[in-house]
Amino acid sequence: MTVYLDHNATTPVRPEVVDAMLPWLREGYGNPNSVYSLGQRARGAIERAREQVAALLGACDASEIVFTSGGSESDVLAIAGGAWQIHDETKGKRRKVVTTKIEHDAVRLLAGQLRRRGLEVLEAGCGADGVTDVAAFSAMLDEATAVVSVMHSNNETGVLQPVAELAASARAAGALVHTDAVQSLGKLKLDAKALGVDLLAVSGHKVNAPKGVGALWIKRGVRLSPVVTGHQEKNRRGGTENTASIVGFGLACELAGRELSAAASHALALRKKIEAGALRVVGARLNGHAGLRLPNTAHLSFPGVDGHHLVVALDLEGICVSSGPACSSGASTPSHVLTAMGVPAELATGSIRVSVGWGSTDADVDRFLAVLPKAVEKLRAAEKVSA
C-alpha cells in the first residue's frame, strides 16, 4: 500500500471533483464561447467556478479571476505581463523587476529571460530561517521598479514570507505587486486584498483538483500584456477554456474553504508528529523557521545521506516523499533555496521534504517514522563503505 507524503508536489484529485468534471467531458462538451445553449451551459459552469475560486481568495470579485493552465503560467502572466505593460506605458522609465532568491523555478527562470530581453532583475536574499530579508528587499525598490514578486510560502521549506510588509514598500515605490500563493491555497486562509497585492497566482493540482488548470487574481484596474493572446478571459488570456478542469478546480476550492480550519489543524498535528519522530534520528535537522511555516510541510536534513537515495529507499518501502534538492544524474545537488539560507552542502544534499494533505493519516506517519531511521542508517553505512 502506498503512503503518499508529497502533497506539495501534487495532490490526489478528490472523488467529488472527478464526479463534477465527468459531465463536462461527456455531454457538456460545448465551446464556452459559443452563443448557442450547449456552449452557454459550459459558460455558466465556468462562471460558477470563477466565483468558487474567488471566494477562497477572500471574497474577491469573480471578474478578477483569470483561468490559466496552472501556477507557472499565472506567474509568467503576472510578472512578464506586468513588466512589459508598465515598461511600455512609462516609455522604459520603469524597467526593473524585484524578486527573491528563493522563488519557484517558474519565477527564477523567467527572471533570466527578462534580463536577456533588457530588463533589470534583482533578487533579495533571506535569513538562515528562510524568511526574505525585508530591509534588503526594500532597498532594491526605486522609481524604476515596475513589478515585484514574492512567494507567499516556499514550496520546499513551507516557510511563510512577509508579503504584506513587502507589498507596502513596493506600493510606496509605485510598483505592481505579485505573490505566488500556489502552495498556500487550501492550507491557510488567504485574503488577496488584505495582503495588499495586485496579482496572486494559484494552481488546481495543489488543492485536490486536476493538473493543467490554475488562476491569476488580477485586481480591478490592473492592466497586463497578455502572454497567450486571444479574446478569451476578457482578452487577458487566450485559448478555449478547459471547462471540465475549471469546474473541478472550482469545486475543489469550495471544499477546501469549507474544511480549511479542520484540515489545517489535522495537518499541523501530523507535521509535528513527523518532526518529533524524524528529529530522533542522529544528526537530523529541521530546515526553515520553526513557526512561520505551512501547517503541512516538514523539510529535514540527514548528514551522511544523499537525499535522492533516501527518497528511493523510502519508495522501495512504498513511501512517497521528495528530495528537497533538484536531482541530476541520480545525485542530489544543493537547492537554490537551501543555498540562499546558508545550509551547509552536506546537509543540503541530504534533505527531504515531507508534506501531508487531504487523506493523510496517523497510520501514514507511523509507517514513515518506522521506516525512516532504518533507511538512513543503511544509507550511512553504505556511504562509509564506498568512501
Image: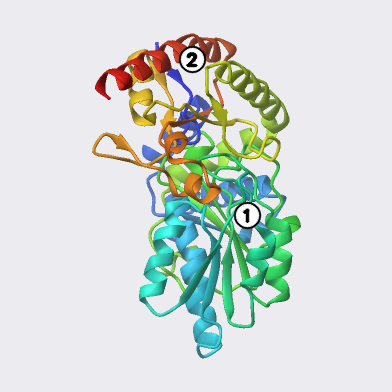
Q: Disc number at residue 132?
A: 1
Considering the image in quadrants, where does the N terminus appear? top left
The residue lying toward the viewer, choosing from 275 and 17, is 275
Q: Residue at 49% across / 63% down in the picture? A: 233
Q: Quadrant of residue 260?
A: top right
Q: Position of residue 37 (x, y in %)?
A: 46, 52
Q: Position of residue 123 (x, y in %)?
A: 53, 64
Q: How is the image coloured?
A: rainbow
The residue lying toward the viewer, choosing from 292 and 239, is 292
Q: Disc number at residue 78?
A: none
Q: Residue at 43% across / 55% down in the picture? A: 106
Q: Amino acid at mark 2?
A: Phe
The residue lying toward the viewer, choosing from 185 and 17, is 185
Tag 2's secondary structure? helix
Q: CA distance from mark 2 to mark 1?
A: 31 Å
Q: Nearer the viewer, mark 2 or mark 1?
A: 1
Q: Which residue is mark 2?
A: 368
Instruction: Identify whether 363 is placed above or below 172.
Output: above
**Lower sequence index among marks 2 and 1:** 1
